[in-house]
Amino acid sequence: MLFTSIFLFIARERVLPRYRTAVMVSATVTAIAAYHYFRMFDNFSHAFAVDGVNNPAAYNVGYRYVDWLLTVPLLLVELVAVLALAKAAQSSILNRLVPAATAMIVLGYPGDAKIAILNIPNEASVWGLLSTIPFIYILYVLFIELGKSLVRQSAEVQKKVRILRLLLLATWGVYPITFILAMSDAPATADQFVAREVGYTIADILAKCLFGLIIYSIARIKSAEDDKEFAKAEFKDA
């Protein structure tokens, strides 16, 4: 996460100014994630490696959800920003995606953290179901509404965006699966706990680092398409 942020920050000059916002948002996403992973690692060490005493209850899943609350909407912002859509179209899409992404994370937290708010049986599953509704809506906007805007993009950019949407679908799909596996009232075993955190981490790396690098490649492609002099200077050895 940290080195992806450093790379994107340095490489922002390799795209035209109109696409640098998307690259810098990508760098911000991975920087936020890097900070929270340091915090999660420290929290994990205190919960499981202090005097040989394991205390899973001391592990605060809130660090991960604060990270997602900040980074998930920004992931969607960078995807829309790099396409350089007309302001009206960009605002229309973001005004739907960002609130939906925020709702998805906020609704998922009580179930994942086992916080009793409604005081009903199987409460975690209720929060999981509620969180799924904005998730499905986000997929609809990305695959249907955003798809309408792609007709004005080059074939190469369209291909990259299709990869990004599938990447989000694949990586975000890990979270509800892991959420469902963790809904049991019985305490998680050590293997289950580690498998859950490793799964979340791999999905995060793909959904943030790889996603950001593809955003950067789209910015490079669109910069070359917009400015022939830039293309000659940047791709003279290609």
Image (cartoon, rainbow, N blue to C red):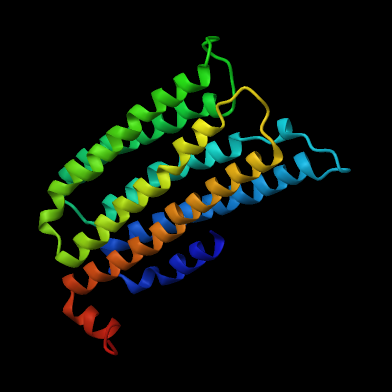
Q: Nearer the viewer, residue 227 or 162?
A: 162
Residue drawn at x 45%, y 33% is 105
Q: Position of residue 161 (x, y in %)?
A: 25, 57
Quarter that holds the C terminus: bottom left
Q: Is residue 193 left or right of residue 5?
A: right
Residue drawn at x 29%, y 58% is 163
Residue drawn at x 45%, y 35% is 176
Q: Position of residue 10 (x, y in %)?
A: 45, 70
Q: Nearer the viewer, residue 172 or 103?
A: 172
User: Against 210, is 145 above or below?
Assistant: above
Q: Position of residue 140 (x, y in %)?
A: 23, 37
Q: Is residue 190 left or right of residue 198?
A: right
Query: Which of the 4 image quarters holds residue 57?
Result: top right
Q: Nearer the viewer, residue 116 or 73?
A: 116
Query: Which of the 4 image quarters holds residue 46?
Result: top right
User: Against 57, is 214 above or below?
Assistant: below
Q: Is residue 151 left or right of residue 52?
A: left
User: Against 2, is 64 above or below?
Assistant: above
Point out the residue furthest to the right here. 51
Point out the residue furthest to the left here. 151
Residue drawn at x 39%, y 23% is 130
